[in-house]
Image (cartoon, rainbow, N blue to C red):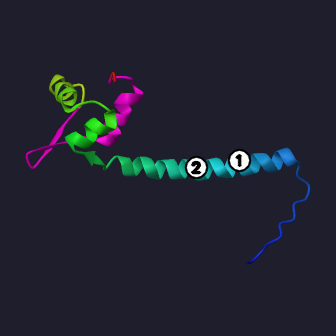
């Protein structure tokens, strides 16, 4: 195992903690941005969407027909964009 020694001079503990926190926040934001970018490409089937929302398929069908949630038809099958569903939940537009 390789060990490294870091020598810190002329900095208070609070300043060091702030610098570490700032660097950690940057790393976390980068991770969240990547995760968010990946989510936009995820499409769920009807069953996956109903399970994700913890509703039955008839409720999902009614919400789709009323225009509460958007369905994408791909080769005669219905898919739902996961990112759009999450946004609707954040806006409290879907009552579960």
**In the rendering, at what x and y percent does residue 91 appear?**
39, 25
Q: Is mark 1 on a helix, strand or loop?
A: helix
Which residues make up the magenta segment?
Answer: 70-94
Q: Nearer the viewer, residue 1 or 22?
A: 1
Q: In which quarter of the image is residue 62?
A: top left
Q: What element carries label 2?
A: helix
Q: Is residue 86 above or below residue 28?
A: above
| Residue at position x 32%, y 33% in the image | 53
Q: Which of 54 and 17 is in front in this view?
A: 54
User: Which circle marks residue 6 in the picture?
Assistant: none
Dividing the image into 4 quarters, which one contains the N terminus?
Answer: bottom right
Q: Is residue 61 left or right of residue 92?
A: left
Q: Which of 26 and 59 is in front in this view?
A: 59
Residue of label 1: 21
Q: How crowded is mark 2: few (under 14 residues within 10 Å), some or many (20 or more)?
A: few
Point out the residue furthest to the right here: 10
Q: Which of 35 and 45 is in front in this view?
A: 45
Q: In which quarter of the image is residue 64?
A: top left
75 within the magenta span: yes
**In the rendering, at what x and y percent does residue 49 appear?**
27, 39
| Residue at position x 22%, y 41% in the image | 47
| Residue at position x 30%, y 49% in the image | 42
Q: In this view, does 1 lie above or below 18?
A: below
């Amino acid at each position: 195992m390789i060990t490294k020694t870091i020598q810190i001079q002329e900095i208070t503990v609070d300043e060091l903690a702030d610098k570490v926190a700032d660097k950690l926040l940057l790393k976390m934001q980068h991770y969240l941005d990547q995760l968010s970018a990946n989510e936009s490409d995820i499409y769920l089937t009807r069953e996956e969407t109903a399970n994700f929302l913890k509703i039955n398929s008839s409720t999902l069908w009614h919400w789709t027909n009323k225009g509460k949630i958007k369905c994408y038809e791909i080769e005669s099958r219905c898919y739902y964009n996961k990112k759009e569903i999450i946004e609707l939940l954040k806006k409290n537009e879907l009552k579960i």
